[in-house]
Image (cartoon, coloured by chain):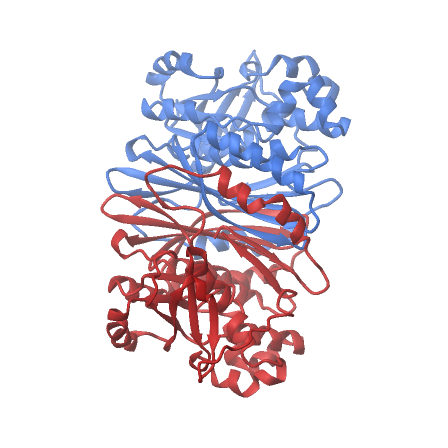
Chain colours: A blue, B red
Amino acid sequence: MLRICLNIIKGEPVDIEELGEFGLIERIKGSFKSRDRRLLQGIGDDTAALSTAGDKVTLLTTDLLLEGIHFDLRLNSPYYLGRKTLAVNLSDIAAMGGIPQYFLLSLGIPRHYPVEFFSEFFRGLKELSRDYRVSLIGGDTSASAGKLTISITVLGEVHRAQMIGRAGAAVGNQIFVTGTLGDSLLGLKILQDSGNPVQSLRKFPRVVLKHLDPRPRIKEGRLIAEKGLATAMIDLSDGLLADLSHLTREIGLGARLWREKLPLSNYYRRNILSFEKDRWNLALAGGEDYELLFTVDRAKVEPLKCLSSRFDCRLTHIGEVVKGKEGLKVVDEKGRPHKINLSGYDHFRTQVTF
Amino acid sequence: MLRICLNIIKGEPVDIEELGEFGLIERIKGSFKSRDRRLLQGIGDDTAALSTAGDKVTLLTTDLLLEGIHFDLRLNSPYYLGRKTLAVNLSDIAAMGGIPQYFLLSLGIPRHYPVEFFSEFFRGLKELSRDYRVSLIGGDTSASAGKLTISITVLGEVHRAQMIGRAGAAVGNQIFVTGTLGDSLLGLKILQDSGNPVQSLRKFPRVVLKHLDPRPRIKEGRLIAEKGLATAMIDLSDGLLADLSHLTREIGLGARLWREKLPLSNYYRRNILSFEKDRWNLALAGGEDYELLFTVDRAKVEPLKCLSSRFDCRLTHIGEVVKGKEGLKVVDEKGRPHKINLSGYDHFRTQVTF
């Protein structure tokens, strides 16, 4: 949040350089600076944060989901789209250590859209909202002269002392991640290759569901926040390296990641080479895993490991924060640098977060 | 808010009946009922309202603005679009008697969009946000595979005792409206007829600006709220009759409007017959005036009239609330019913608010 997400879909380059020249990011950041005292965090974190009475903080996050950019209805079902629409916003609240409470939903609906679509969309949305105890409190629904447009705003809360921002990491902090890496993009590739969501789901349920139906790590984020175990946290929406750079490079720090420690699912290990030449690329750069990536003071590593028995997913120690001049490195089991070759990833997604 | 706004643009019918059968409204309302204690107002008012500490209420409203539905860039400038984008959301806060504080902005940007567009869009947005002292605190920006998409969420505040909902009117209450009626749609018609925004603005600045650059009645809404003068209030986005029916018909009441009292601008009086056969239609059914429509207990009519000297616009006493069985009537100077002939309006906009 506030993210410039210039997705580039197959054969459709976005004129990002032109936008770069224009300096849209700098323009927004510069001209909308706020000196409001209640505003603990504005543009530049997973959510905005406003102090409220009783040492509470109100968290606010919004996402736009556009057909043809963020989802492809040939590869997705309206049911899963309804779930994911809300899930990706809850994940931003999880990354602050917060509790999601309410949401607003806006829909721009193309003419003659199949009515069954909404029946299924709302079934999925409703289920996820029940699972995470968030209430729909308003929104706006309109016809669309273009494609299906979805906008969600989520409001959550966290105790001020428990809020985890992006900017708190320090040299020597240890880097942890929940769940597994790269499965979501692998699931998308399987869907794109087969063109058949039902068949893909049946054959490869784990990774395909990881893409279609991500589970926001609210519970894990809350546990980490309550115990004060993280110095900084972010959710993995843009890929491990991109999101890690928000926690490190953006505040002048570097990071060392241990390649062999990256948590890969069994399915990923067995099948990645059918889809990618480099077995590490999706784990390092695949987006939309919606896991939590966070940094931890050395002294808190053991308490964290104990706490992780209460997580619904695995927790993995994948590296450490180093000085800025060392940059962001991935090293193999012998400490040799892993050559990161991400050419070919720009065609999939180019994102600039601010 | 949460509004089903099925705008029908020229020659492009929306299959509203199909959506009607599907019962989208009932589905959303029914399946997302909340029993949350903090939720003072969910789906069905100008904004959602959440009680917070210290007898304060947090107000939340969101609107989707879609190219080809809510705006036409051939008739609008990016500068005015930036202003109006925020203004229409502030108007929802005004209708609750609230103070707007923060906003989130999401943009879906088509490929190769002229970069000057954003320079002008943000100039307008920034100006209006300064005028009304609201801070941009986050958002989401993405490429769009379709048309330009704008989503705004505004967060505001009001003292609980001062909040004005839609459902408080009673038989005998007097009906008031700020500003003038019908000018916005008249301005749009002028723009559509000429196809030349610069020329239209030069020749008919008042009504064209009323359409392009509406001013949310925050100040007036606050004054009315502070003094506790209104029993119910709404902003005029869908047209006088449609919005009045939210304050009356929806809670089983009727209303009598005095036709000759409807506040018309001089420009409207002089020129309406060049654009419409029936001189009253735009005043009764034209949308997007963004004035405040509210009901007042008889005992408070005089205090209200005194207070209105502090308004930036005129205030007009246009009718009264009657029993439900009398329906919603417009009467002429002799008390005879004015025949409302709105055929031809459906083609412009069909809205269902819930």
Relative to B299, B124 lies left or right = right
Give residue B99's position: percent from left, percent from top: 33, 58
Residue occupying the far front of the picture:
B325
B171 or B159, which lies in front?
Answer: B171
B61 or A222, which lies in front?
Answer: B61
Give residue A28's position: percent from left, percent from top: 48, 54
Residue A63 visible in the snapshot: no
Q: Is residue A331 above or below residue B352?
A: above
Q: Quadrant of residue A334?
A: top right
Q: Is residue B69 above or below residue A206?
A: below
Residue at figure coordinates x 52%, y 42% from the top left: B28
Q: Quadrant of residue B320?
A: bottom left
Q: Is residue A303 above or below residue A282?
A: above
Q: How many marks?
A: 0
Residue A114 visible in the snapshot: yes
Relative to A137, B54 lies left or right = left
Give residue A12's position: percent from left, percent from top: 73, 45
B327 or B2, which lies in front?
Answer: B327
Give residue A78's position: percent from left, percent from top: 64, 35
Relative to A41, B114 lies left or right = right
Q: Is residue A113 above or below residue B272?
A: above
Relative to B113, B289 lies left or right = left
Residue at figure coordinates x 60%, y 63% from the top left: B349
B272 or A81, which lies in front?
Answer: B272
Residue at figure coordinates x 45%, y 47% from the top left: B43
